[in-house]
Image (cartoon, grey):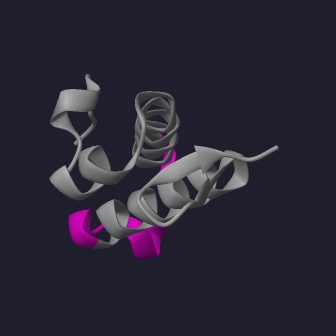
Amino acid sequence: MTFRRNTELPDSVKRCLPLPAQDIYRSAFNHTWQGCRSPEARHAMQRELLAHKVAWAAVRRRYEPDGSGWRPKH
């Protein structure tokens, strides 16, 4: 399960993140999903959860919440 386009991202991601942050999220999610080989994360549900956590962490490195959405960090 990977996302080819930002339009395929979950609504919760599309609703609150600006497009550049969606790109970061999608890239981090896909990278984690494709590279996840650990035995404990092979189950699809665990693999997906891990990929979403990594994706949000990637967004938080470059963006911060501003009350109504997310803005780039300075």
Query: Which corner quadrant of the image does residue 26 belong to?
Result: top left
Residue at the outermost top position? 5
**Residue 8: percent from the left, percent from the top?**
17, 35
40 to 61, vertically: above or below? below
Residue 67 visible in the current orientation:
yes
Q: Nearer the viewer, residue 45 or 54?
A: 54
- Left or right: residue 58 versus residue 30 is right
Q: Which residues are magenta?
A: 35-45
Q: Is residue 10 left or right of residue 72?
A: left
User: Which residue is more in the foreground, 74 or 12?
Assistant: 74
Q: Residue at x 74, y 47 (%)?
A: 73
Q: Position of residue 32 (x, y in %)?
A: 49, 47
Q: Nearer the viewer, residue 28 or 22?
A: 22
Residue 41 belongs to the span the image colors magenta: yes
Q: Can residue 68 be found in the magenta stretch?
A: no
Residue found 41% across the figure and 69% down from its top:
41
Residue beneath the point at 26% across and 23% down: 5
